Image (tube, rainbow, N blue to C red):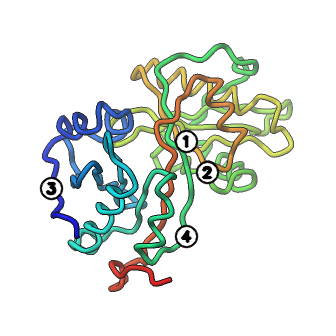
């Protein structure tokens, strides 16, 4: 049995509980606009948006048992149904707990990274040109659809504040990326895409470096998320000075299902 989860009332307390965790400091708004629930050496933070769900953070000294107890309490105390939660996210070392406790839909593994250090100059940055979210939306969408269907730049939606791109000698857009802002206010790289025939030519590095400089000038920090199966992107971001705060596993829960809290029977 697990004890009742206790609400965490403020961002300051959440930051203290997590030992000044960079994801909490940079990725979660202050004041805290969301639900945070404390178990024994683990905390669950509600994540709003189309991925609406709980992100689980182990605390100092916590382990598999503590994360498991927290997940069971989220399920059995009704927090998932009550809030209409559609997904659960745990650090990858704890991913095996999810199918043991829940019926699951699809999901993915991804990493959340951050930096406060400007990157070294990258060849190709001199080719970067600013793009407009509305004016160039069709070009940006076409590039992403053809060469990076998982991209999340959402051109034309107003979500992305700044775009940088590279054009070839004929003027065609061959690489691009955007700078968004998290709910916390921290700048966040998104929608980075390079035309497939030109991958490996350094254009992704140039776009990422340019966007990182914009973010650091704006706020002194830059964040990003990347899919864990993209080893080349990980190497690139690390060369640019990014550090991995968390490697996550996110899985969907059955949408609007009355069985959302029923444990998976294997």
Q: Write down the residue under mark 1.
A: 190
Could you tell me residue 245's position as x and y percent?
46, 36
Q: Write down the residue under mark 3.
A: 6
The answer for how far apart the CA atoms under marks 3 and 2 are is 37 Å
Q: Write down the residue under mark 2.
A: 151
Give the vertical position of 142 relative to 103 (above or below). above
Tell me the element at label 1. strand
Residue 2 placement: quadrant: bottom left
Tell me the element at label 3. strand
Q: Write down the residue under mark 4.
A: 106
Could you tell me residue 167's position as x and y percent?
76, 32
N-terminal of the pair, mark 2 or mark 4, is 4
137 vs 90, left or right, is right
Residue 259 appears in view: yes
The answer for how far apart the CA atoms under marks 3 and 1 are is 34 Å
Q: Quick check: marks 4 and 1 in contact, CB under 8 Å? A: no
Tell me the element at label 2. loop
């Amino acid at each position: 049995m697990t004890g009742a989860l206790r609400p965490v009332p403020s961002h300051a307390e959440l930051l203290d509980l997590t030992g000044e965790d960079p994801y909490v400091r940079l990725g979660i708004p202050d004041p805290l606009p969301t639900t945070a629930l404390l178990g024994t050496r683990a905390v669950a933070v509600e994540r709003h948006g189309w991925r609406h769900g709980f992100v689980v953070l182990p605390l100092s000294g916590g382990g598999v048992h503590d994360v498991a107890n927290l997940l069971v309490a989220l399920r059995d105390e009704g927090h998932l149904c009550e809030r209409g939660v559609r997904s659960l996210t745990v650090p990858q070392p704890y991913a095996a707990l999810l199918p043991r406790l829940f019926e699951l839909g699809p999901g993915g593994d991804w990493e959340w990274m951050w930096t406060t250090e400007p990157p070294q100059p990258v060849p190709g940055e001199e080719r970067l040109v600013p793009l407009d979210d509305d004016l160039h939306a069709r070009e940006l969408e076409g590039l992403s659809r053809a060469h990076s269907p998982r991209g999340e730049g959402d051109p034309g939606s107003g979500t992305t504040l700044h775009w940088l791109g590279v054009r070839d000698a004929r003027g065609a857009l061959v690489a691009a990326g955007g700078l968004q802002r998290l709910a916390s206010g921290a700048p966040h790289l998104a929608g980075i895409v390079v035309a497939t025939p030109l991958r490996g030519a350094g254009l992704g590095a140039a776009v990422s470096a340019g966007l990182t400089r914009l973010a650091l000038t704006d706020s002194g920090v830059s964040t990003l998320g990347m899919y864990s199966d993209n080893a080349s992107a990980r190497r690139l971001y690390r060369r640019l000075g990014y550090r991995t705060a968390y490697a996550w596993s996110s899985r969907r829960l059955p949408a609007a299902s009355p069985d959302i809290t029923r444990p998976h029977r294997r």
